[in-house]
Amino acid sequence: MAATIILDAGHGGYDNGASYNGRREKDDTLRAALAVGQKLEDAGYHVLYTRTTDRYDSPFEKAQIANRSGADYFISFHRNSGPNPNTYNGTQALVYEAGTEAARLGKSINDELVDFGFKDLGVVERPGLVVLRRTQMPAVLMELGFINNESDNQLFDQQFNEMVDAIVTGVEKALPLKTPSRKYGVQVGLYRYESNAAYMKDQLESQGYFVSIRWEDPYYAVIVGREDSLDDAMELQNQLRQDGYDTLVVSM
């Protein structure tokens, strides 16, 4: 079963991100996300995007888009920047926490980018980043070299296709097409308005449940749990019914 991956092109719209000699981070990230997405789709993955045009969404909105999508993994693309041009260079993977599935994915991508030609700046914890903290799936933010470093820009521009191939190879090594296994959750409501779904989510979370909101056009589905087996999901369903909720077991 192919993983569903949502790709995020950092920044966008009025938020240019870092810039250098007229070059804008938001343009580089969109170019990379679209190219990586096309190659991942060609390889058999399901690919979604937080944006495909020059549009602004806040980091919180990007996390919401990802959570509503039901994707299995989130990868955000950025370009780094240093205080002085041509002082720092290299690729880096940012994750919420070390030793996680997200960190494994980030290391796999980063290793391939290092083999491709970037300096290795490693996998680094950044729990304060909203797109890593608020996403409900393993999330990685990739810094594709420094935008104010000529050698990194040369790699990005002159060997763009090879760089994209390196990223895709990193994903393929970390997430073989047979993974992830099917997950199950318990749907407790469908809402026309996201605010109503969010209210239900808050109520359930106050009772100790793990809750996500998934967009199922034209409704917002409130889903409890992310269970590895149908039996576990049915056990969770019984618990929710005892708490007074109407339920339906769904695959994720």
Image (cartoon, grey):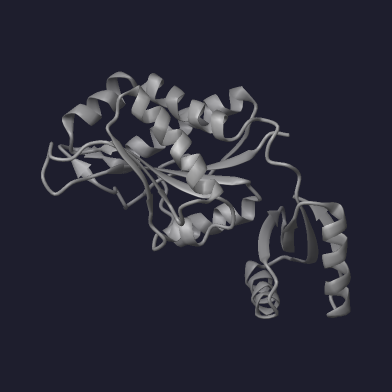
Residue 236 in the image: state x and y as whole percent.
82, 66
Residue 195 in the image: state x and y as whole percent.
62, 72
Q: Count the marks: how many? A: 0
Q: Residue at x 85, y 53 (%)?
A: 230
Residue 72 in the image: state x and y as whole percent.
63, 46
Can residue 50 be seen in the rendering of this structure?
no
Q: Residue furthest left?
A: 84
Residue 82 in the image: state x and y as whole percent.
18, 46
Q: Residue furthest front?
A: 99
Of the pair 148 and 14, the residue shown nearer to us: 148
Q: Quadrant of residue 29?
A: top left
Of the pair 213 and 165, the residue shown nearer to us: 165
Of the pair 225 and 214, the residue shown nearer to us: 225
Q: Quadrant of residue 204?
A: bottom right
Q: Is residue 72 above or below residue 189?
A: above
Q: Residue at x 68, y 79 (%)?
A: 203
Can residue 91 be seen in the rendering of this structure?
yes
- Quadrant containing the N terminus is top right
Q: Is residue 51 above or below residue 114?
A: below
Q: Is residue 102 above or below residue 38?
A: below
Q: Residue at x 64, y 40 (%)?
A: 4
53 left or right of 177 in image: left
196 left or right of 55 in image: right
